[in-house]
Amino acid sequence: MRRRCGWLRLSPLALLASLSGCSGHQLRLLHPDGPIAATSLRLSVIDVLIMLCIILPTGIFVAISLWRFRAARKARYDPGFTHSVRLEVLMWGVPFAAVATLAYFSWRGVFLVNPYAPTALGQRKSLLAMPDRPGKANPLVIDVVATDWQWLFIYPDQHIAILNALRLPAGRNIEFRLTATDVVNDFYIPQLIGMIDVMPGMRTKDMMRADRPGVWQGFSADISGAGFSWMQFPTRVMTQAGFAAWVAKTQAVPTHLDYARFRSMARPTIDLGNVTQVFSAVQPHLFSRIVHAAMNGVTYTTPMFLTEHMRRDLARRVPYLSGYPHS
């Protein structure tokens, strides 16, 4: 029994030791690098602290009650007790204050991280003050298309596109217009922007900003089929000059993107090789045409051989599992 109690005393230390191996890579949500992600984390922390204001006192009160009124103590029994103003205030006042505070921050949070017009992209004067609504200061528009199972990013004003990678300028507001070709996916960059559904035949919007250069991992957060786990894209944030140079370089590539090429590229393809490709001279209004095609019932059927012998084909690294459209 003594040996068992010794192990119980050491169990909290073992738990702390196991958590010490967690790095920022695994805990991306705790290391935000953009105003939207930072605001979401701050609101989550506020919610947790408010709830702890209820949970901790309640737990302490229950423990004290169990100890004070235990049978061995033979506490005084008062059968005539009917009412206590202090207890009523404590049991009703604290939850009411907590709910009211949660309601206030929930109301603020709706505007702060609203995908269509997040006020978190404005200047925050204080924790309690509502940030200024961001003006239409020439955001960079990017059309996002989720296929089975790749990501296509179209820059309509620059007439370029990139497959399975995202390039952004630092310090500039980004406006995403998102859709999918066949099934629902989730667009998610944990350290920069929250999760949002991407649906076929619909156009959703989201906004964000990254204030410093760096590389962050984006991925699909909705199980959408055999190639879902490979549906990832590195997000590289560059300086304004670096982004301008990348745009100019991409505009000079000979590979163009029109709707016919997109349809070939949108067929179900498992991006095992993490293939990245850039395109110039993107067909105007390509994004709208993709949305309208999905609304009119255009789909991309997954062939049986794509998933029928996946384990064997993964070992052989067959071409259609390498990120290139199959024939």
Image: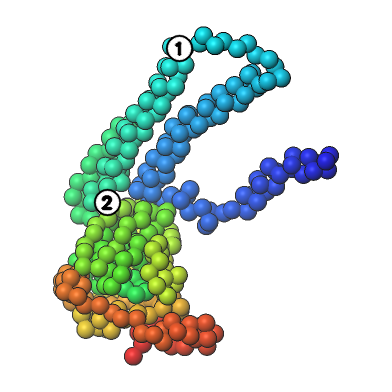
- The three-letter code of the residue at mark 2 reads Pro
Q: Would you say 50 lies left or right of 67 here?
A: left
Please state the horizontal and vertical placement of residue 152, each as a whole percent of the image.
31, 71
Q: Would you say 68 lies left or right of 312 here?
A: right
Q: Is residue 43 above or below residue 94?
A: below
Please state the horizontal and vertical placement of residue 62, each as a whole percent of the image.
57, 26
**Label total for image:** 2
State the separation of the CA atoms marked 2 and 1.
49 Å
Q: Would you say 74 lies left or right of 216 here?
A: right
Marks 2,1: beta carbons within 8 A: no
Q: Is residue 234 above or below residue 258?
A: above
Q: Which picture quadrant has residue 169?
A: bottom left
Which residue is depicted at the point 47% across and 16% down? 87
- The three-letter code of the residue at mark 1 reads His
Which residue is depicted at the point 27% across and 55% down? 206
Which residue is depicted at the point 71% across and 19% down? 72
- Front residue of this view, candidates 205 and 183: 183
- Front residue of this view, candidates 40 and 68: 68
Task: List the residue tagged with mark 1.
Answer: 83
Residue farthest to the right? 2
Q: Is residue 236 above or below residue 163?
A: above
Q: Quadrant of the C terminus?
A: bottom left
Few, some or many residues within 10 Å of mark 2 (<14, 14–19, 20+): many
Few, some or many residues within 10 Å of mark 1 (<14, 14–19, 20+): few
Task: List the residue tagged with mark 2.
Answer: 115
Which residue is depicted at the point 27% across and 47% down? 114
Residue farthest to the bottom? 327
Q: Please report whichever mark, 2 or 1, sits nearer to the chain's N-terminal start.
A: 1
Please state the horizontal and vertical placement of residue 317, each as a whole percent of the image.
50, 86
Regarding residue 249, the answer to whether it shows in the image is: no
Q: Nearer the viewer, mark 2 or mark 1?
A: 1
Q: Is residue 270 above or below residue 106?
A: below
